[in-house]
Image (cartoon, rainbow, N blue to C red):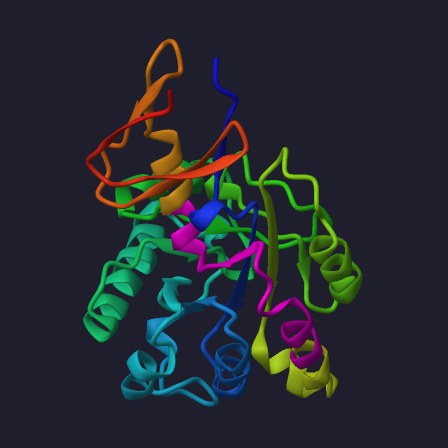
């Protein structure tokens, strides 16, 4: 029987994603740094606050975040665990609708405003078109989430960032899939006068052959794709019913399983 391991795209076994909230003007500088080093991020926006104070304007959003992901953060950033269900629904759906009108694609992610959530809110999300949501906090490891509606990052950028980056880059055992997930707010770099921190981080982790650089939703979609592969009982072939390719390691050989195809191993 073949030894089969699921892989990230092109046979990679590590992925890196970034997650930044609120959509304030400092995102312009942060996106510029990401683009310089080929890092991909997800930006969670409150569409009801666009154009107010130091928030970005509506007409800046589409071009600024091109190549990254725009995701929901509720309409007005309330502490939603204290809100009635009707308001929670409006906050999330209105934010989705407004952002989709701006970027022209389906917005399917969320980060909980003020880190506020509970079991009832989690149970509502799939009916509101949300497929993942990030919580606050740091787990200081590189495990894939067991619950995409309670997605905890590896670290905030002010918490052991370079220590975690060094450990992540040096991972070489391929028996697991690893994820480094960094979160924060771009205005914090300006407040703390530490833009050099994120610049140095991006420089350090960039251009690594074994890392897949992805947005939050790209990771969700790809994990779901892997989980939807249909393997034969004797592990001699697999069918991929999805439209996009999946990658597997079969007896240490990297194999692309193209969308809509059946691939034989032996």
Q: Please tell me in which quadrant of the rendered image residue 226 appears.
A: top left
Taking the image as shown, residue 237 lies to the left or right of residue 136, namely: left
- Give the answer, above or below, for where 144 lies relative to 166: above
- Residue 108 screen position, x and y as percent: 32, 53
Query: Is 68 colored magenta in this rendering?
Result: no
- Give the answer, above or below, for where 160 lies relative to 171: below
Taking the image as shown, residue 147 lies to the left or right of residue 123, namely: right
Residue at position x 63%, y 33% from top?
175
Question: Quick one: 105 or 242, which is closer to the camera?
Answer: 242
Residue at position x 30%, y 51% from top?
89
- Give the answer, above or below, for where 141 lies relative to 211: above
Pick the quarter of the image with the C terminus.
top left
- Residue 180 screen position, x and y as percent: 62, 54
- Residue 185 screen position, x and y as percent: 58, 73
Q: Please tell me in which quadrant of the rendered image residue 173 appears.
A: top right
Query: Is 212 colored magenta in this rendering?
Result: yes
Question: Quick one: 221 or 185, which is closer to the camera?
Answer: 221
Q: Residue furthest top?
A: 234
Question: Quick one: 219 or 134, which is closer to the camera?
Answer: 219
Residue at position x 50%, y 85% from top?
32
Residue span colored magenta? 199-220
Q: Residue furthest front?
A: 266
């Amino acid at each position: 029987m073949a030894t089969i391991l699921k892989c990230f795209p092109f046979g990679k076994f590590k992925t890196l994603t970034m997650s930044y909230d609120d959509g304030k003007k400092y995102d312009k500088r942060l996106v510029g740094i990401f683009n310089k080093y080929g890092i991909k991020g997800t930006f969670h926006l409150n569409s009801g606050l666009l154009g107010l104070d130091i928030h970005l304007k509506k007409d800046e959003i589409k071009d600024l975040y091109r190549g990254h992901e725009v995701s929901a953060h509720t309409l007005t950033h309330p502490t939603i665990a204290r809100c009635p269900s009707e308001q929670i629904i409006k906050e999330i759906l209105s934010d989705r609708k407004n952002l989709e009108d701006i970027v022209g694609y389906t917005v399917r992610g969320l980060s909980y405003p003020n880190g506020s959530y509970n079991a009832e809110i989690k149970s509502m999300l799939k009916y509101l078109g949300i497929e993942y949501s990030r919580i606050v906090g740091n787990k200081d490891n590189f495990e894939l989430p067991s619950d995409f509606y309670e997605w905890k990052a590896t670290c905030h950028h002010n918490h052991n960032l370079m220590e975690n980056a060094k450990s992540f880059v040096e991972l070489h055992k391929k028996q697991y899939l690893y994820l480094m997930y960094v979160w924060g707010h771009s205005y914090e770099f300006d407040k703390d006068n530490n833009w050099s921190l994120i610049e140095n981080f991006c420089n350090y982790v960039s251009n690594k052959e074994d890392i897949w650089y992805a947005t939050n939703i790209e990771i969700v979609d790809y994990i779901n794709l892997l989980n939807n592969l249909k393997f034969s009982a004797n592990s001699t072939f697999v069918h991929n019913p999805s439209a996009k390719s999946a990658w597997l390691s079969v007896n240490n050989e990297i194999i692309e399983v193209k969308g809509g195809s059946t691939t034989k191993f032996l």
